[in-house]
Image (cartoon, rainbow, N blue to C red):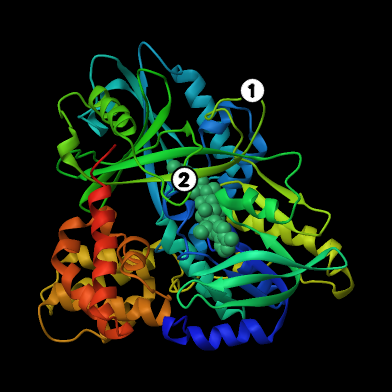
Amino acid sequence: MALSSLHRLSIIEKLKGNHFDLLVIGGGITGAGIALDAAARGLKTVLVEKNDFAFGTSSRSTKLIHGGLRYLKQLEFGLVKEVGSERAVVHHLAPHLVVPEKMLLPLHEKRGFGSLLTSFGLKLYDFLAGVKPEDQRKMLTRNQTLLQEPLLRKDDIKGGAIYAEYRTDDARLTIEIIKSAAQHGAEVINYCRVLEFIYKERKIVGAKVREEISGNEFEIKSRSVINAAGPWVDELRVLDKSKQGKQLHLTKGVHLVVRKKTLPVKQAIYFDVEEDSRMIFAIPRGRTTYIGTTDTNYDGSKEEVIVTGEDAAYLLRAINQTFPGLNVTNDDIESSWAGLRPLINEEGKSATELSRRDEIFESPSGLLSIAGGKLTGYRKMAERVLDQLNSRTFAERELEDCKTHQIRLFGSDFKNYGEVKQYVASIAERLKKVQLGDEYAVYLVGNYGKQTELILNDLQSGEPEVELAKAELRFTIHHEMVVSPLDFFIRRTGMLYFNKPRMQKVYNVVLEEFKGVYNWDMVQFERERLKVEQIISGVTSFK
Ligand code: FAD
């Protein structure tokens, strides 16, 4: 099952010619999780995504697999217990991609929580999530906190705490779940948009879709349909004429990326912003540190969500107040991204107060829509919506129970994190021979896990960094349905966010490779080049 973009025509023929049990709309983490769970339970499943996989919120999060410490304050114990417990499960399913990250929580003299309350809250957090004793929270004195992070403003630190979370790459996690779904028999395709639903006796029995690359429209027949379209969930409910009762409430969150040298924090930090007491993260990743996030109500375009000057100024103020010796400015920003939280509206609540719980809406036509939730809870969301579908549509077939807790994701053939580290060391040795530094071993294994082997086996002779990018491109075209340069630079490699210097170096070669593989003429080549250049300039120019 290689998910090759060169096999699109044969995939489309299968979509046209089959009668499916389940059509999943949306190739974000929610749809991906549902497709894997459904295929593993034996349902004949198809997933369609209108843009690239993980185009929506699932490539624009804070990229943490976390329990949501702040939801304790909102007394969301059930949510914290579920997502907190899921962290270890998802780490086990992809130990190279969901990696342990200790988080520092500084405590202040004049604001925020006291040491006792924090100590109790973190204890409860560990307890609810069943965290192993060796990973449980440790309280720090003032000196220990400042030793842990000497960049912190010194005058009002009274202590701190260290607790366990996990870091991931949201888009890579999504793509590996999608590949695992395909391995279990699901048909999946990106750039294929649901235009309208098909009904028989008022019950939903499929959808009319448009393949966005050729513009061809066709029908997909399916006994059931799940709408996992994230911020677009309500648009599909409108198509189904069933948008009644609860609705989505979109809030925007932005992140800024600076060089590690600019914000050289020693580890991930979760701190509160002096002016409004909101909590934000500063997270080191490779040669960068990223900072986020904001949380503001949103009613603009869902296709193009931008970072405004006001968003950037807020995060820069927060950074400069917390780490006063640094003076980080707009000129230091290397990249940024903005995403939308598809939350469920609750009258009278502000953006930050809205619950992060997921909810399922069932329409009279049988369309199931699922929204809300977290990246971290994707498996449980999938299990819930499929159990609901099962009891209604497939009751006579006795669907198997959910087993995604046992399905290691693509490229994750590691027993534990220790094995991942050994593998990184062995890849580093191999890369030395072709003049590539250790940082590439960390990057490749973090991104592709054991699939690194396939990429390195395809390395040609030439300038090492350029040849590596070309080998990655061939891999992602043949195994991950990459269709456009943005799929590659943003969602498969994260280069646009976390390695702009590398992107600048390989950019022209990558575009030339695309031109060759897809036989672009000069007009199309220029169109694609312009698209990438607009996005590149957009991540550092804020309106
Ligand atoms: P999406 O990822 O948006 O996927 C929906 C997909 O449906 C899109 O790709 C879209 O193109 C597709 N689609 C829409 N309409 C159609 C159509 N007509 N036909 C076909 N396809 C269609 N959670 C965490 O656990 N940890 C975090 O650190 C974290 N940080 C966050 C930070 C921010 C700023 C935000 C905004 C969210 C964060 N979250 C986090 C929450 C998490 O990212 C989201 O809950 C999750 O990504 C939502 O995934 P989704 O699949 O539901 O939606």
Q: Position of residue 121 (x, y in %)?
A: 53, 28
Q: Secondary structure at mark 1?
A: loop
Q: Position of residue 12 (x, y in %)?
A: 56, 83
Spot the residue most to the top. 110
Q: Nearer the viewer, residue 109 or 260?
A: 260
Quarter of the image with the C terminus in it: top left
At label 2, which amino acid type do we have?
Ser
Q: In percent of the image, x 19 and y 67: which residue is there?
A: 507
Q: Nearer the viewer, residue 25 or 238?
A: 238
Q: CA distance from mark 2 to mark 1?
A: 24 Å
Specify the quadrant of the image occupied by residue 468: bottom left
Q: Nearer the viewer, residue 4 or 167?
A: 4
Q: Is residue 396 left or right of residue 411?
A: right
Q: Is residue 147 left or right of residue 291?
A: left
Q: Nearer the viewer, residue 73 or 428?
A: 73
Q: First in sequence, mark 2 or 1: give its number.
A: 2
- Per the image, the residue denoted by label 2 is 301
Specify few, some or many for label 1: CA neighbours under 10 Å numbering under 14, 14-19, or 20 or more.
few
Q: Position of residue 449 (x, y in %)?
A: 37, 71
At label 1, which amino acid type do we have?
Gly
Q: In percent of the image, x 89 and y 73: which residue is there?
A: 396
Q: Position of residue 264 (x, y in %)?
A: 19, 40
What numbered label is drawn on residue 348? 1
Q: Is residue 73 above or below residue 357?
A: above
Q: Secondary structure at mark 2?
A: loop
Q: Is residue 283 above or below residue 222?
A: above
